[in-house]
């Protein structure tokens, strides 16, 4: 049993306690602002006040969690041999306490507070890794929240050596975004002949042959890597389907066509789940996201609860508010396009907290830590370098018994370069026994 002694019981604090003490440590806890209610002989007491109280674990509050409004902050950040990185450091807690405002730090990272102030964005309007505190302070590729929780356990165990914490289990999930189900198969007659004409005009005989064969039998389609994925993955697989052929950045085959329905029904036989891939064009439209979700549900003949934004188009809090309203329960967009790593500094799921309404939501956010396009288009690394990056992220996730979630595209496995072979990288991760 843990008691948290506070000066002010707030929604932000309650959210952090649920994530740290509840979800990660698995503790039963109570919150009080009255020291006279505390039975020091029967409970571990975390003193989240400015008062000195004996027989407690002090954490000096910075005041950040007492706020009920959105105000741009820049927490002081320093490195530490034991705690790795401290946000809002405060050594007033003494030797037995926590040398920084742990609860404010966790809230800042999990809520993605800094992303509400998107002063600089990329050409798609996205908050980039280079703008994040984690990237600037060098902990983007490290699940800092889990590290803090492990050290926090050690502090608690000094007062209660017999206390037992929740035991987490490492898990691995390969997720596939289907932006282009096929290169040729399933195209409308108009676009099929347009592609053929372009190949003929360019004297690209190989493309002409590929197109004809792919139309006769979809197994010859260059983007048909589904069997390769299934045979070379020793972990659960999930698919996110783009249900739009509106053009621009949304160029999948007809979402109402027989070809895409047949594909999804085939994948659903062994997939962990099939989720929605809300289109680029739907990013600011609740109605369009709802329409695409309805199309997907009609195609797979079951409800849709999972999603990941196309192009990782994530805007706080609008995107997540939309997903909650259409009934999505789990989202997998939490990863940067330009850098691998843990965008929210965690390798475990967490609930989205809406800073504008100052309330937690039912939406569970899952941290994806690496994307194939990041390796090929942004970092432009070699096969060896890509394996090393992926392996490092895998090992640090296993260290904390977290969820190792990766992002691939079915069409990426055909677009190999002279230095990067994504098939080889994929097989190195998933085509061997897990220990």
Image (cartoon, rainbow, N blue to C red):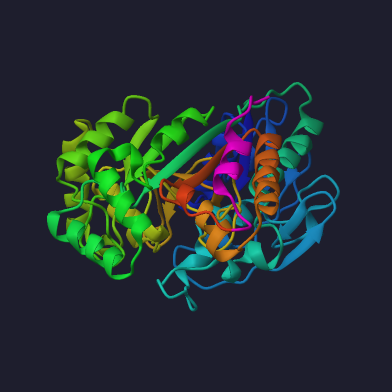
Magenta segment includes 402: no
Q: Residue at x 32, y 24 (%)?
A: 269
368 horizontally vs 410: left or right? right
Q: Quarter of the image containing the N terminus?
A: top right
Q: Nearer the viewer, residue 195 or 55?
A: 195
Task: Say whether residue 183 is visible.
Answer: no
Q: Nearer the viewer, residue 395 or 242?
A: 242
Magenta segment includes 423: yes
The answer to which quarter of the image holds residue 429 is top right
Q: Quarter of the image containing the C terminus?
A: top right
404 horizontally vs 239: left or right? right
Q: Residue at x 52, y 68 (%)?
A: 128
Where residue 152 appears, x then y in whole percent?
Answer: 72, 41
112 horizontally vs 92: left or right? left
Task: Say whether residue 115 is visible.
Answer: yes
Q: Residue at x 29, y 29 (%)?
A: 266
46 horizontally vs 32: left or right? right
Magenta stretch? 418-435
The vertical placement of 1 against 113, above or below, is above
Where residue 210 appears, x then y in whole percent?
Answer: 33, 50
């Amino acid at each position: 049993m843990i008691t948290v002694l506070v000066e002010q019981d707030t929604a932000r604090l309650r959210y952090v306690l649920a994530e740290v003490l509840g979800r990660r440590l698995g503790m039963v806890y109570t919150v009080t602002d009255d020291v006279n209610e505390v039975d020091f002989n029967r409970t571990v007491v975390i003193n989240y006040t400015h008062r000195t109280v004996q027989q407690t674990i002090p954490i000096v509050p910075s005041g950040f969690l007492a706020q009920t409004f959105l105000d741009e902050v820049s927490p002081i950040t320093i490195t530490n041999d034991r705690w790795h990185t401290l946000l809002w450091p405060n050594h007033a807690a003494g030797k037995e306490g926590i040398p920084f405002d742990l609860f404010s730090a966790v809230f800042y990272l999990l809520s993605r507070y800094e992303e509400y102030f998107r002063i600089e964005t990329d050409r798609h309007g996205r908050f980039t890794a280079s703008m994040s505190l984690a990237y600037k302070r060098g902990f983007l590729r490290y699940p800092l929240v889990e590290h803090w929780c492990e050290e926090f356990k050690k502090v608690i165990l000094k007062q209660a050596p017999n206390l037992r914490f929740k035991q987490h289990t490492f898990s691995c999930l390969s997720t596939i975004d289907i932006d282009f189900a096929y290169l040729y198969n399933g195209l409308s007659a108009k676009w099929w002949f347009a592609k053929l004409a372009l190949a003929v005009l360019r004297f690209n005989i190989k493309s002409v042959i590929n197109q004809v064969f792919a139309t006769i039998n979809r197994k010859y389609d260059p983007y048909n890597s589904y069997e390769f994925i299934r045979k070379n993955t020793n972990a659960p697989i999930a698919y996110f389907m783009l249900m739009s052929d509106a053009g621009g950045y949304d160029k999948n085959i007809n979402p109402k066509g027989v070809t895409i329905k047949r594909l999804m029904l085939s994948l659903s036989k062994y997939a962990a789940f099939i989720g929605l891939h809300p289109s680029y064009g739907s990013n600011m439209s609740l109605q369009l996201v709802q329409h695409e979700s309805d199309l997907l549900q009609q195609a797979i003949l079951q409800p849709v609860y999972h999603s990941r934004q196309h192009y990782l188009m994530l805007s706080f809090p609008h995107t997540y508010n939309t997903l909650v309203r259409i009934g999505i329960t789990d989202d997998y967009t939490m990863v940067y396009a330009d850098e691998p790593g843990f965008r929210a500094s965690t390798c475990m799921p967490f609930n989205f907290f809406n800073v504008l309404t100052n309330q937690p939501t039912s939406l569970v956010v899952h941290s994806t830590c690496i994307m194939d396009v990041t390796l090929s288009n942004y970092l432009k690394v070699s096969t060896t370098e890509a394996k090393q990056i992926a392996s490092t992220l895998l090992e640090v996730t296993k260290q904390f018994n977290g969820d190792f979630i990766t992002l691939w595209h079915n069409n990426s496995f055909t677009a190999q370069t002279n230095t990067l072979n994504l098939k080889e990288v994929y097989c190195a991760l998933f085509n061997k026994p897990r220990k």
